[in-house]
Amino acid sequence: MRIKRISLLNKLVVSFVVLAFGFTQVQSQIPRRDSLQYQIQRLKSKTDFNPQDSTFIILLNDLGNEMRYFNSDSLYLLSKEAYSYSSSAKYEYGQSSSLVGIGNYYEDQGDYEEAIKYYQKALKIVKDIDDKNEILNIENSIANVYYYQGNYAESLSRNLESLELASELGNNKMLSIINENIAGLYADQNDFEQAIQFFKIVKKINEQIGDDINSAETMSNLASVYTDMGELEYAMYNINSSISIFEKHKIMDWLAFAYQVKGKAYLKSKDYKWALYWYKQSEMLHKNIEDNRGETTLLNGIAEAYLGRDKDDLAEEYALKAFEISERIKFHEETQNSAKILYQTNKNKGDYKTALAYHELFQTLHDTISTNKNEKSLTMLITKLDFEKQKEKLIVENEKALASQKIYIYLGLFILVIFLIVTLIVKRNEKIQKKLNIELYNKTAKLVENEKELLEINETKDKLFSIIGHDLRGPIGAFQGLLQLYKNGEIDSKDFLQFIPKLRSDIDNISFTLNNLLSWGRTQMNGSTTKPSIVSLENLIKENINLLEETAKVKSIGIKNKVKVNTLCWSDSDHIDIVIRNLLSNAIKFTPEGGQITINADEHSTSWEISVRDTGIGIDAENLEKLFNKNSNITTYGTNNEKGTGLGLSLCKELIEKNKGEIWVESVIPNGTCFYFTLPKMRSKLQKAG
């Protein structure tokens, strides 16, 4: 989808230029850029020409805006020149329009921080002169930049606020644009149902406006969304309608986009011949247009079409061009698409090293973008809900305020009659104010508490994503890659079987990691329920030794279980099973070959003290202090480079404490480590009943 915007100067230029030159007939006969250049030259040729004249400044800014997608350097230079003259003349409209032009330049170059800086400067000026329509236009530009940055929540929030202002002003043109850009936000998240709902609103507004070009722009964007949905008949109807309008009015930048969408529709139906035809039509127009984002999408589309026609050399050529531009302007979605195509072309020609590099880049970008889109979808939903709540709250408060004003008017009449009533009212208001202050204080305290809980939940979520991304994606990705190579016949069965021990090790590690993640996630997010019962520690330890015996044998590590048969405790069997498995797994991980692990249990008056001692490498003092820290994520490789999640020990601490025990560690480098934990002794039936 292509972002829509409105020129800040169109409405001004029409009135100034027609009055000054009576030039409407010439404008209808030649392109608008040529018309503006002609008018600028005519002004300069006058004997009383003054570059600080507002008409001249408006023409400079409008010409820069027209040059935006044809020569971006001209946009920058014209805007800088107009800003200089506007500043000297203290012409505020000219200054804000010039700053917007400079912001547009930086936006198109992918320098979004610089773009926002200039838009904010322009916004401050129009706010100072209280021009709400110009505020609306600039806020739309800022929302678009946040969209390109991937900050969908901020973009949606600003668009929703702008909708309120546009409705207040009755500005149907901006209502159409803002609703369409919101539709684009949802379409980008593949929430097509929401996107289509906003497009329906846009179509109704466009019917009221009666502007063919604006309607054609909407139909182009709608066609793009229908193509992504696979609704190709609807897509073709809308794109053909828009193309005829753009061709009639010679709107070249939107015509290039429309041709590109038509090519995308044919590509979706695997009609590569016609896809290439329409993409090439768009490419011809792009030679005279500077639209980096649009060009990147176009180049990748052409590359895909050539790939579909088995013309790998041409596909690679276009994909490399798209890759270079998308990298420069930080357009990650198209960088991902380029990497996917380049992986396929290099694989087809046997350059597996280069193909693998592009595949890894594609996988990384795909995982990052997918994760970001999931988070952005949730953030957009939260933003919309927050906005609706704030809007509802404001409506209620306004209604209350209006009701209060009526009350005060009636009370004012009584004030003129009886002074006593005034006194009573003042006291009453003081009482109400005091009550409101107390309520405000309580609500503020509640908000702070809710914010703290939300931050803790977000920390939990971030840690889960981090561990999943770090410890699970690698082995799974390697497994997928190996299966793909086998499926494609690039390795035979004999070679594949050589990887079986490594795959088993990776899968065992994934299984162990997932068990820890699920257990830890429950304790963090839901508050795991402890269900104590009589537990035989000797049996539990024996089961875990049997489970990990193969892993220990690989490293020739001996495991001694000195726990007696009658060692019974009162605890949650599932919890203690996780603790023993984690401690034993860690001991094996950090014990070198030929080492020894000893598990013992000492009886105290009301508890058992269980120890897991190894002859491993030991733990340094710095890590020893942070070992059980909930917010720590210490992940260390074992003596044979075994991987861990960094979750095991913090999980063990939480589970032991839930079972009314304690856990601690003693370690001496390089003589090994001993983990201790305590558990309550078995309770009698009488104790349990009490």
Image (cartoon, helix red, strand yellow):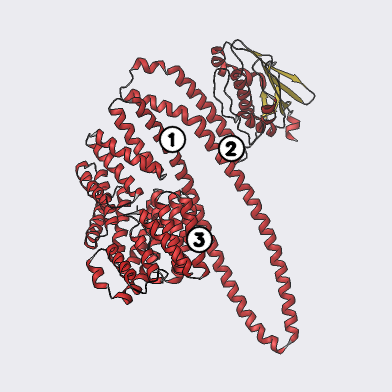
Q: Quadrant of residue 208?
A: bottom left
Q: Residue at x 54, y 28 (%)?
A: 513
Report the residue marked by disc 1: 364
Q: Going by the image, does 314 lie left or right of 619?
A: left
Q: Which mark is residue 121?
A: 3
Q: Is residue 175 above or below residue 471?
A: below
Q: Quadrant of residue 323?
A: top left
Q: Which mark sits nearer the N-terminus, 3 or 2?
A: 3
In x, y percent, where is residue 349?
27, 27
The disc labelled 1 sits on which kind of residue? Thr
Contact between marks 3 and 1 (CB within 8 A): the answer is no
Q: Which mark is residue 226?
A: none
In x, y percent, where is residue 581?
60, 23
Image quadrant for the C terminus?
top right
The disc labelled 2 sits on which kind of residue? Arg
Q: Nearer the viewer, mark 2 or mark 1?
A: 1
Q: Is residue 204 visible?
A: yes
The disc labelled 3 sits on which kind of residue? Lys
Q: Which mark sits nearer the N-terminus, 3 or 1?
A: 3
Label count reads 3
Report the residue marked by disc 2: 522
Q: CA distance from mark 2 to mark 1?
A: 28 Å
SS type, badge 3: helix
Q: Nearer the viewer, mark 3 or mark 2?
A: 3
